[in-house]
Amino acid sequence: MTERVTQEHLESIITDKQFHRLTETLTVCVLTLRNGFTVTGESACVSPKTYNQEIGERIAFENAFNKLWQLEGYVLKNKLAGF
């Protein structure tokens, strides 16, 4: 059993990625995983004048991906501990 979570593993369990602009300054990324679970990430800017869709989506994805990394780390720790 591997003792670390890898970027490749995380990428392999993501089956879908969606972006939603919910307000003039808020972007949400929804990652759907192989098991149907979803993980979200958000990004927001201060003013609609400075909103940039590409940057908003990139940051929202990075935040969702980092959440997924934490969740998979928790799962791996449980496996290594015999739970």
Image (cartoon, grey):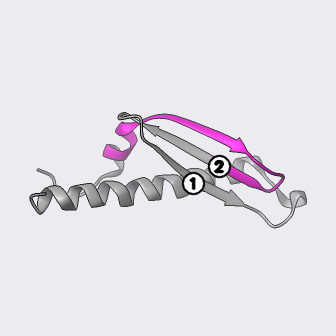
Is 44 left, or right, of 14 in this rendering?
Answer: right
Tell me whether circle 2 and circle 1 mark residues in contact (CB < 8 Å): yes
| Residue 3 seen anywhere in this rendered image of the structure | no
- Percent position (x, y) of residue 42? 63, 56
| Residue 24 among those drawn in magenta | yes
Query: Is 25 contained in the magenta span?
Result: yes
**Which quadrant holds residue 15?**
top left
At label 1, the amino acid type is Gly
Q: Residue at x 70, y 51 (%)?
A: 27
Disc sitting over residue 28 in the figure: 2
Vertical arrangement, residue 82 with respect to residue 16, above or below: below
User: Looking at the rendered structure, which numbered label has been put on residue 41?
Assistant: 1
Which numbered marker is on residue 62?
none
Residue 34: image x %, image y %? 37, 33
From which residue to which does the magenta span run? 9-28
Disc count in the image? 2
Q: Residue at 39%, 42% (x, y): give it.
A: 11
Q: From the image, which quarter does the C terminus lie in? A: bottom left
User: Marks 2 and 1, how far apart in space?
Assistant: 6 Å
Q: Nearer the viewer, residue 57 or 28?
A: 28
Q: Position of residue 82 (x, y in %)?
A: 9, 58
Where residue 25 appears, as percent x and y from the top left, is 80, 56
